[in-house]
């Protein structure tokens, strides 16, 4: 997300989509474990906090396929989400940047990130998160849904289009905050390294992305918890989800699943940015010569 402003929009979109798919598939078991912990459990049944323990229990009791329940939905959503996030951030950043220096102030950088997060939530994230969460919740209880498309049809039939946007407020707040924090932290680190002539490499990109992921997780976890409750198989309003978290665990419950999410975001931030740089470098030569030929 800190790529060169000259990057063609089609490269931003394509590279972002590729990076999102790789990141989602590689880290999905941690996302699965985090979602399981955030959903309501039976009273008196302790929920393990160690993500590896949750993954191990599900694997031993339900098999490897259970760990990837809803994965295809998240991968498809991530292709759209990260493609749109990279593209919209680039466009918004170009609109906000200083015409003389081509740079953004920290506040404008944050605003650009928030706006691109809102765009991603409306276009891709909320519907795919709703289906992914419903599939995970359904797998441990009723097992009504036979597949991703069957789940979409059932939700649409029972609740209409609004059913696909359950948890929209929580998801949008999470996306706006997550995108702003992730972009902001990543770009602050990149600027720090650039000012001190620290060479950029796969290792520095991965480390910067991982730090950005950790900051983002702690800052946006309450929105993620509310969003998960809203998007369970039966659904709930934002107010109902808020009240249920407080009733079950108190204020600390809003950070339920943080350990699981950290298990994913430590890797996901690094994977996302390094994958993006790799994909952009691969796609750029395929696009730029064609554009230069057209201009000529």
Image (spheres, grey):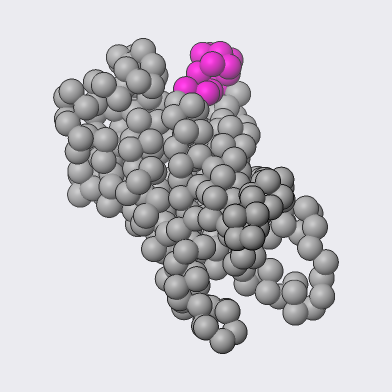
Judged left or right of residue 3, residue 163 is: left
- Residue 38 in sight: yes
Instruction: Look at the picture and state if 93 lies above or below 264.
Output: below
Judged left or right of residue 250, residue 27 is: right
Q: Is residue 170 magenta?
A: no
**Secondary structure mostly seen in the magenta stretch:** helix
| Residue 282 percent across, percent down from the top left | 71, 45
Quadrant location, the N terminus: bottom right
Q: Residue at x 39, y 63 (%)?
A: 115
| Residue 139 percent across, percent down from the top left | 39, 19
Instruction: Look at the picture and state if 182 lies above or below 277.
Output: below
Instruction: Look at the picture and state if 280 lies above or below 131.
Output: below
Which image quadrant is residue 24 in? Answer: top right
| Residue 36 percent across, percent down from the top left | 44, 31
Q: Residue at x 55, y 63 (%)?
A: 183
- Residue 219 in sight: no
The extreme front residue here reads 296
Residue situated in front as seen by the camera: 201 or 130: 201
Residue situated in front as seen by the camera: 143 or 9: 9
Quadrant location, the C terminus: bottom right
Judged left or right of residue 247, residue 185 is: right
Q: Residue at x 53, y 23 (%)?
A: 67
Which image quadrant is residue 151 in? Answer: top left
The residue segment tinted magenta is: 57-69
Labels in figure, total: 0
| Residue 155 percent across, percent down from the top left | 24, 26
Q: Residue at x 68, y 74 (%)?
A: 191
Judged left or right of residue 279, residue 61 is: left
């Amino acid at each position: 997300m800190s790529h060169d402003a000259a990057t063609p929009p089609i490269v931003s979109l394509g590279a972002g989509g590729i990076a999102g798919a790789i990141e989602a598939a590689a880290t999905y078991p941690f996302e699965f474990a985090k979602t399981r912990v955030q959903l309501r459990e039976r009273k008196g049944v302790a929920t393990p906090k160690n993500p590896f323990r949750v993954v191990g229990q599900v694997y031993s009791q339900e098999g490897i396929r259970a760990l990837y329940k809803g994965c295809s939905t998240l991968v498809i959503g991530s292709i759209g989400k990260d493609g749109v996030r990279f593209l919209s951030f680039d466009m918004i950043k170009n609109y906000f940047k200083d015409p003389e220096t081509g740079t953004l102030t920290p506040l404008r950088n944050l605003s650009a990130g928030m706006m691109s997060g809102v765009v991603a939530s409306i276009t891709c994230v909320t519907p795919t998160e709703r289906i992914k969460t419903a599939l995970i919740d359904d797998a441990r209880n009723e097992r009504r849904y036979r597949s991703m498309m069957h789940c979409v049809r059932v939700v649409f039939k029972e609740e209409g289009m609004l059913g696909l946007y359950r948890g929209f407020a929580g998801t949008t707040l999470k996306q706006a905050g997550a995108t702003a924090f992730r972009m902001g932290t990543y770009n602050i680190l990149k600027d720090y390294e650039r000012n001190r002539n620290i060479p950029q490499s796969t290792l520095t990109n991965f480390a910067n992305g991982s730090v950005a992921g950790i900051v983002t997780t702690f800052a946006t976890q309450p929105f993620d918890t509310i969003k998960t409750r809203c998007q369970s198989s039966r659904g709930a309003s934002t107010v109902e989800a808020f009240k249920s978290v407080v009733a079950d665990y108190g204020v600390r419950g809003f950070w339920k699943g943080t350990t699981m999410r950290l298990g994913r975001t430590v890797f996901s931030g690094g994977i996302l940015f390094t994958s993006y740089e790799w994909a952009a470098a691969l796609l750029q030569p395929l696009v730029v010569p064609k554009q230069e030929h057209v201009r000529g």
